[in-house]
Amino acid sequence: MTLGKKRILCVAGTRPEAIKMAPVILALREAPWAEVRVLATAQHRQMLDQVMQVFGISPDIDLDIMRPNQSLPELTARLLAELDTVLASEQPDVVLVQGDTTTVMATAMAAFYRRIDVGHVEAGLRTGDLQNPFPEEMNRVVAGRLSRWHFAPTEGSRQNLLREGFDPTAIHVTGNTVIDALKNVVARDLPRPEGIDPGKRLVLVTAHRRENFGEPFREVCRAVREIADRHEDINILYPVHPNPNVHDVAHATLGDHPRIRLCSPLDYLPFVSAMKHADLVLTDSGGVQEEAPALAKPVLVMRRETERPEAVAEGVVKLVGTDFDSIVGEADRLLRDPDAYRAMAKGVSPYGDGLAASRILSILSADLLDR
Ligand code: UD1
Ligand code: UDP
């Protein structure tokens, strides 16, 4: 048994990392053996800050990395240089990263160069296609290769890692911390989404994937408009991602429609409330694919591949790609056919039970305090 506390540095750069790392940070704060430090790279600025506030977390270190319309090479280069300086001064025993963003890949590399152990939360997700999602599939492959602990959300993600030859004793199926975060928030008093006619059905839309930029994303927007045109009894709420490649096209294509409400990214509480009130969710988001099924909402995923096949296998998420006819056709079917709708609104949660963070802590403490 080691006498001193273990220094655990939790890193988050973007909105989804903060949401999914928050339960781990909150649990570590309560652990007598851990001294937790929080590093925000702020690869996202406003969207990261929102989430940190919701969970009452203020970063100990903030790199303030984000620049408008940042490119992947410049983002990666700045992250690597700044992270190395922080790791040199912080000297953590363990660095925890979550997910598949550029922050995660760069942090795993920076820790590797300093010979610091990395724990990867949400490990083992794979499509097997480095172009889809881009660049996230590469980010998680690199982060996985450099990690000592793989906290896999599902048995399927564990199997992906085993196929790649990872040591089975380093892989732990914990569930996804997104369900811990969701349970924390759903238990609170959630405001109704603003500016939405309660007499109409609600379709919630999000989209931001880089591999869809350009024509595929314009097609997605045309499909969303067509769905609104075909169904007079629906409102569409679409919190638009601030990336200019998304923001400008969404506003140009959809901004003038009387039943499509475009708004800035919602804070996590109002967004969860919007999911709860939604009848149907159209998205290319990773996190939303995990949350909406837990809230019994059918999800159409506007991507060519998903690294989250479990909910598809359960029949509560459907992969529709970015093709106009496919998106409109599937949305039409669900909005017109109550049996088809009920079959997808079952409320299954293949990604976790809300106890992932406590499992991660048990594994870390068992390994670290044994040394
Ligand atoms: C990033 C992640 C992606 C993740 C997504 C979650 C990478 C390469 N991409 O994509 O995996 O799914 O976050 O949302 O790591 N911006 C703001 N304010 C913000 C956030 C973003 O203005 O709070 C704008 C800036 O112009 C910024 C741009 O969006 O340069 C892109 O941000 P970036 O983090 O590079 O990529 P995302 O598309 O957000
Ligand atoms: N989210 C949010 N406000 C929004 C849209 C999404 O708080 O306006 C939350 C959502 O509940 C989920 C996370 O952000 O937990 C997903 O982030 P995003 O779609 O940006 O990234 P991804 O999960 O695709 O990496």
Image (spheres, grey):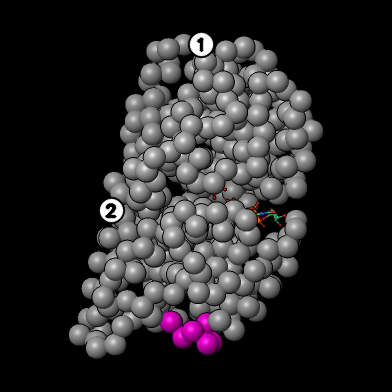
- Nearer-the-camera pick, 312 or 287: 287
Residue 157 position, x and y percent, is: 39, 52
Q: Which residue is mark 1?
A: 336
Q: How many marks?
A: 2
Farthest residue in the left direction? 1
Callout 2 amino acid: Leu
Label 2 Cα neighbours within 10 Å, binned few <14 / some 14-19 / many ≥20: some
Residue 370: x and y, percent?
A: 22, 81
Quarter containing the N terminus: bottom left
Name the residue at 75% across, 35% down. 251
Q: Is residue 174 left or right of residue 145?
A: left
Query: Is 315 drawn above or below residue 21 in the view shown?
Result: above
Q: Is residue 336 or residue 125 the one in the foreground?
A: 336
Name the residue carrying label 2: 355
Q: Name the image quarter holding residue 223.
A: top right
One can see residue 155 in this view: no
Which residue appears at 47% of the width and 36% of the height? 191
Which SS class for mark 1? helix
Point out residue 114 in the picture as x, y percentages from the top left corner: 51, 84
Q: Nearer the viewer, residue 5 or 222?
A: 5
Picture residue at 37% right of the left edge, 20% below the top = 343
* Secondary element at image label 2: loop
The answer to whether residue 142 is above or below residue 342 is below
Q: Is residue 113 magenta?
A: no
Span of residues in magenta: 87-92
The tag earlier along the polypeptide, 2 or 1, is 1
